[in-house]
Amino acid sequence: MKLQLALDRLTWDECFNVVGQTQDSIDIIEIGTGVIKEYGMPIVREMRKQYPDHTILSDMKICDAGGHEAKQAFSSGSDVTTVMAFSSHLTIQDCLEVAREYDGRMMIDLLEVNERSTIQKLADLDVDLVSLHIGKDKQTENGFSSNLFDLLEGYSFEVAVAGGINEQTIDDVVSHHPDIIIVGSAITKADNPAEVAKRFKEKLVS
Ligand SMILES: O=C(CO)[C@H](O)[C@H](O)COP(=O)(O)O
């Protein structure tokens, strides 16, 4: 089980500061969508330069022009980038093809997906990594619910989970044995991110 730190709603300096404090506890550095919108590919390149041994995920949340945007992410040093599950199968296919060219991976974001037919579409496209995700706005109504895992019942994807996961909910999430647990605010907004990230890491089982 891997810990992915999501860098969202932070300045450039805050991103590097929190990664600097938590680097020993995290496996994957996620450069969040809003951070990419603010700073573009230069922040991905700088993160790659400073953290050559960490996996870097750019949360591009691609939904169209998949080949071009995936290329932007991988050519800047990302190991993984994201495409929305509701996108056209052509967009997802193009992303997967670019990922193969760069020896990278696509994570397919299941934000707002409730239909098993969408999951079957992903399986038919030979997708291998998906993320169950409750969006930031939706979190004001409902936090991460274990029921989300039901959507993937019977499929063998590698699974990441995200959406307001905190120290109160981590045990429940871990009990479903996802491959990657994505934590943002619970670490980045903590008084002592290093300590909190260490506690999260200790909860993850291999
Ligand atoms: O993709 C995201 C937002 O769209 C975040 O990475 C994800 O929600 C994790 O952050 P948090 O733990 O703060 O919810």
Image: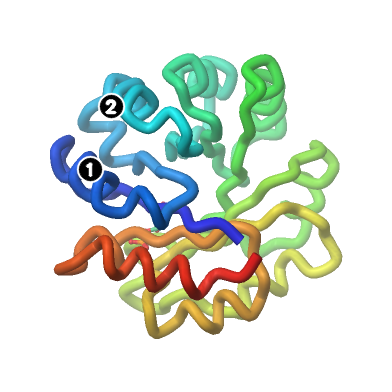
Name the quadrant where ligand 1 sits: bottom left
- Relative to 189, is 135 on the left or the right? right
Residue 140 is situated, as x and y percent measured from the top left of the image, at: 31, 74
- Relative to 162, is 154 on the left or the right? right
- For disc 1, the neighbor class at 10 Å (few under 14, some 14 to 19, many from 20) is many
Q: In this figure, which residue is indicated by the disc labeled 1? A: 15
Tell me what residue is drawn at x 55 percent, y 62 percent. Answer: 161
Say which of 116 and 49 sits in front: 49
Tell me what residue is drawn at x 82 percent, y 57 percent. Answer: 156
In the depicted structure, whether residue 126 falls above or below residue 178: above
- Relative to 107, is 136 on the left or the right? left
Residue most toward the front?
A: 24
Q: In this figure, which residue is indicated by the disc labeled 2? A: 43
Residue 140 has which mark?
none
Residue 131, quarter of picture: bottom right
- For disc 2, the neighbor class at 10 Å (few under 14, some 14 to 19, many from 20) is some
Say which of 14 and 54 sits in front: 54
Residue 22, quarter of picture: bottom left
Are the residues flagged by discs 1 and 2 in contact, CB closer than 8 Å? yes
Pointer 1 residue Cβ closer than 8 Å to ligand 1: no
In the depicted structure, whether residue 130 falls above or below residue 199: above
Identified by mark 2, the residue type is Ile
Residue 197 is situated, as x and y percent measured from the top left of the image, at: 35, 64
Residue 7 is situated, as x and y percent measured from the top left of the image, at: 31, 48
In the depicted structure, whether residue 158 falls above or below residue 104: below
**Structural distance between the alpha carbons of marks 1 and 2:** 9 Å
Say which of 83 and 197 sits in front: 197
Residue 134 is situated, as x and y percent measured from the top left of the image, at: 46, 65
